Amino acid sequence: MNASSKPIAITLGDPAGIGPEIIAKAFRDAPQTLQNCVVAGDLASLRRAAQQTAVPGQPALPVALLESLEHLPDVPPRCIPVLQITQQLEQVLPGRISALAGKMAAQCLQWAARAALQGQLAAMVTAPLHKEALAAAGVPFPGHTELLQHEAAQHAGLALGDLPVRMMLANDELRVVLVSIHLSLRDALDAVRFDTVLQTLRITHQSLCALLGRVPRIAVAGLNPHAGEGGLFGREELETISPAIAAARAEGIQASGPFAPDTVFMRAREKPGQPGEFDAVVAMYHDQGLIPVKYLGVEQGVNVTLGLQGSEPAPWRLVRTSPDHGTAFDIAGTGAADASSLIAAVRMAQQIIHFKSK
């Protein structure tokens, strides 16, 4: 079966958050986009979400329970297809951190990752989960990226360190790849090393070559104000970041910098009639990269995990995208959540699949 004809699984996320609601809204508002999608989740959670998000005066979208992926083509239009992945022993309360919710989210994520790695899925799109709920459930990973890295490495028979991954946040205007992900700022500064910066440039180059169909132009942000100002404000740019860029360029990677972090994102931003100078920016730590992307609009931001190639050397072996927002416990259960970022994540996954299948 061609990769583009295989289904995309949307994972439930934390059922106490807005995940079920944005999934229901996405099927309601973008049925053509979600035509070949299936929810890896929980029937009861999706039925409640369909009721909560029903348009006044119109019936809620029906939710169909599938026995297997093979039955997806039989689902009628304007219906939410669900695979019952997790056993819900009791109802999860909206907006409450619980071990049960964390366990349900992890089970759905693990099922989708394994199904994708086994070739049953074209991609997976993950609804947001809650890190405290994961921890309460005893899940030994702080988030999606780390859990998926573990699953891909295990599938490939590799040690975790031999399957490096990176987080890319993207929208229509900007792509940002992070050197480190979920670390304290103090630890993230220590993670800015020659090997980690060079590794990030390699993963970014390989992944965007596959996505764009050409060699990407990669800008590298400095760590310190004004990119260190020639060593006046720190020497990381001189001693670590610049040598990594030089090594990457020697490998044919089109990387440049380090640039002042307070201006490089503006230079890379693509606006109507004004293309950006770069296809992506490599940021040195989590907030340095995520703040500019999220400022441009959380509703269109997409999180893409780079490097999950599984048992094959080619990139995009495991395609995973996600909305660029969290569980929003403060509005969970109200029906007020915006599904735009989830819909954008599905479209991004479809775009990657399209390039992958060429």
Image (tube, rainbow, N blue to C red):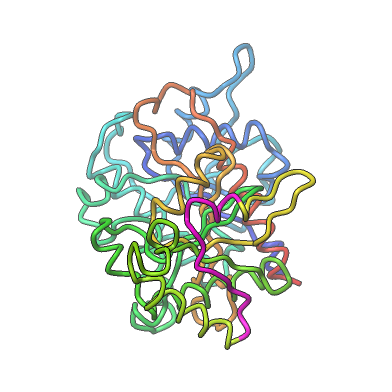
**Position of residue 295 in the picture relative to residue 273 (left or right):** left
Residue furthest to the right in view is 273
Which residue is at the front of the view, 269 or 109? 269
Q: Quadrant of the N terminus?
A: bottom right
**Position of residue 118 in the picture relative to residue 7 (left or right):** left
Please identify the quarter of the rendering in which residue 206 is found. Answer: bottom right
Please identify the quarter of the rendering in which residue 175 is found. Answer: bottom right
Residue in the image at 26% along x and 45% along y: 133
**Position of residue 92 in the picture relative to residue 247 (left or right):** left
Which residue is at the front of the view, 109 or 298? 298
* Numbered-mark total: 0
Q: Relative to residue 260, is residue 163 depicted above or below? A: below
Q: Relative to residue 50, is residue 98 depicted above or below? A: below
Provide residue 242's location: percent of width, then percent of height: 46, 76
Residue range of the region highlighted in magenta in the rendering:
252-266
Residue furthest to the top in view is 57
Residue in the image at 67% along x and 63% along y: 353
Provide residue 191's location: percent of width, then percent of height: 31, 69
Residue in the image at 46% along x and 54% along y: 289
Residue furthest to the bottom in view is 250
Q: Quadrant of the C terminus?
A: bottom right
Provide residue 190's location: percent of width, then percent of height: 27, 68
Provide residue 249's location: percent of width, then percent of height: 58, 82
Which residue is at the front of the view, 326 or 260? 260
Q: Is residue 263 magenta?
A: yes
Q: Relative to residue 323, is residue 6 depicted above or below? A: below
Q: Is residue 45 magenta?
A: no
